[in-house]
Image (cartoon, coloured by chain):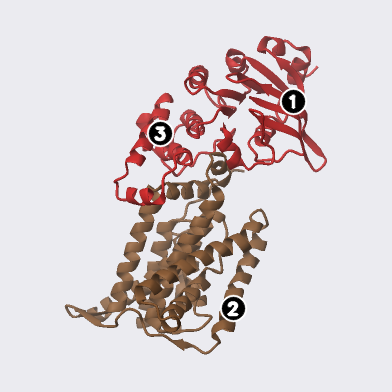
Chain colours: A red, B brown
Amino acid sequence: MLECKNLGIQFGGLKAVDNFNLNIEKGMLYGLIGPNGAGKTTVFNLLTGVYKPTGGTIRLDGNLINGKTPTQINNMGIARTFQNIRLFSNMSVLDNVKVALHEKVKYPLLTSMTHMFGFSKKEKEMDDLALEILDVFSLGTKKDVLSGNLPYGEQRKLEIARALATSPSLLLLDEPAAGMNPNETEELMETIRKIRDMYNLTILLIEHDMKLVAGICEKLTVLNFGTELASGTPSEVLNNPDVITAYLGE
Amino acid sequence: MLINFIEQLINGLRTGSIYALIAIGYTMVYGIAKMINFAHGDIIMVGAYALYFSISVLGLPVPVALLLTVIVCSVLGVLIEKIAYKPLRKAQPLAVLITAIGMSFFLQSSSLLIFGSTPIPFQSVIPNDNIKVGPVIISSITLVTLVVTAVAMILLTLFINKTKLGSAMRAVSEDKGAAELMGINVNSTISMTFAIGSALAAVAGILYISQYQSMKPTLGALPGIKAFVAAVLGGIGSIPGAMLGGILLGLIESVSKAYISTELADAIVFGVLIVVLLFRPSGLLGKKKIVKV
């Protein structure tokens, strides 16, 4: 599904990610963990085309994606959320999801113009589609709220909903549980499992909450100083002495 | 006295409408590309000359000429963005600003080369009659200006809030990076913004030239700057702000001209801007930026 080979990026003299390998099979729930500043978000930025790699290759279902623009990569089936929430905060909850759907549902400008006067059937279909996604996250009742006014936990959920609206095959979640309380995290874990099954997704997530990581990830890769420290099942990785040292020091 | 005041207000609304139409272009482009397109005022000039050329030289019927003018300006706006601004999208704001000013000079000089510096008189395309509403006299040009502006604003508001392109525009103006990652085609959204902004400038150009009936290569400069002031006054980046700013500016200008002094009118307009910015640095309807430290 996703294959990174010897992936690397340099900022001046700093190798933020170096010689990074990753192989994710279809349908997997994969975790990327590591201490602060290890380069996890940089990997996401490489995968989504925000940064251009200075070395190595990224392939999605065998197709080379490095060098493509973020929009092209999104159209090929990779969607993401952000560590620091980046919703369109002056748009309603529904519009946040619809704007991501829009690029997938093509219709001519004329239809768009007639909709200004409220005639379009297509637009109604899109509303329904967007609501369907929102309901998965129990956000359907808040569709008209400005997304910036949602409580923090719901903003995180809406980010996932918006990413799903672009109908990805691979979903990247950057610290989805950051700032959530244990109950919310528990609920989020359920939701992540649910959407994976509902939408046939492969999910790669960055997370600091070890309970979440150990609870839902089938495989983990630990990143430290931009290189891979260890990979394997959660129990293998979390008992690896090198990993413990990297997190807690000697 | 009262009737005179009402007539002055209507005059102000007319000038203000034209400012508002131009200011919308400034504010939309700023919202989406985070730059001040100083060549925007000159689009009005191109619009005026395009209308003159289609009617007086090509001899096209008025409706066709009007349509052609709007198309010429839209295409020009998109081309300017593609050729001059797009390569600088990641450059420093100062480089973009200088380029925009350069583009403005380029357009003025080109029209100076083609049409010369002698002002060209141009008969209004709108029949010039005076309409009496009770004791108040309104010229037909004023009436057309007000109606056209109102219709343009309503259509634009619906477009921005109700259509897919409109919501893509809002998304790009909030967070270009996130929009890209959600599959929104940022380049075509920016082109669309320039096209709409320039089309509105063309409409403003047509209305302006119908009023003043004489054109020279620098005719876009002053309304351009005034509209820029209007956009800042209303809160740059905000479309309702540009509409409000434009109308207010026109009203203030007209009333100052009538009751204070014609020479001081511009100074008063800019004075109002300074006072507003002292109390509301992001303009009347602009969003406050909270910077996290």
x 37%, y 85%: residue = B123
- Give the structural element (helix, strand or loop) at label 2: helix
Residue nearest the viewer, comparing B223 with B293: B223
Disc 1, SS: strand
Residue under pointer 2: B110
Q: Residue B101 sits in which quadrant? A: bottom right
Q: Chain of mark 2?
A: B
Residue at the image position 51 percent from the left and 30 percent from the top: A160
- Relative to A60, say whether B254 is above or below: below
> What whole-number distance in Å separates the C-alpha atoms at marks 3 and 2?
50 Å
For marks 2 and 1, give the CA distance: 56 Å
| Same chain letter for marks 3 and 2 | no
Please tell me how crowded label 2 is: few (under 14), some (14-19), or many (20+) other residues with Cα within 10 Å: some
Return the x and y of residue A187 as percentages of the image width and height: 48, 18
Check disc 3 and give the amino acid type: Ala
Whether pointer 3 and pointer 1 mark residues with C-beta atoms closer than 8 Å, the reply is no
Query: Circle 1 sits on which residue?
Result: A21
Q: Quadrant of residue A76?
A: top right
**Residue position marked by numbered label 3 in the rendering:** A130
Percent x, y of residue B109: 60, 79
Nearer the camera: disc 3 or disc 2: 2
Label 3 CA crowd tier, 10 Å (few <14, some 14–19, many 20+): many
Within 10 Å of the Cα at label 1, are there few (<14), some (14-19), or many (20+) other Cα atoms? some
How far apart in space, not on screen, are marks 3 and 1 (Cα)? 36 Å
Element marked by disc 3: helix
Disc 1 sits on a residue from what chain?
A: A
Whether residue B6 is visible to the viewer of this picture, yes or no, is yes
Residue pictured at 45% horizontal, 56% vertical: B238
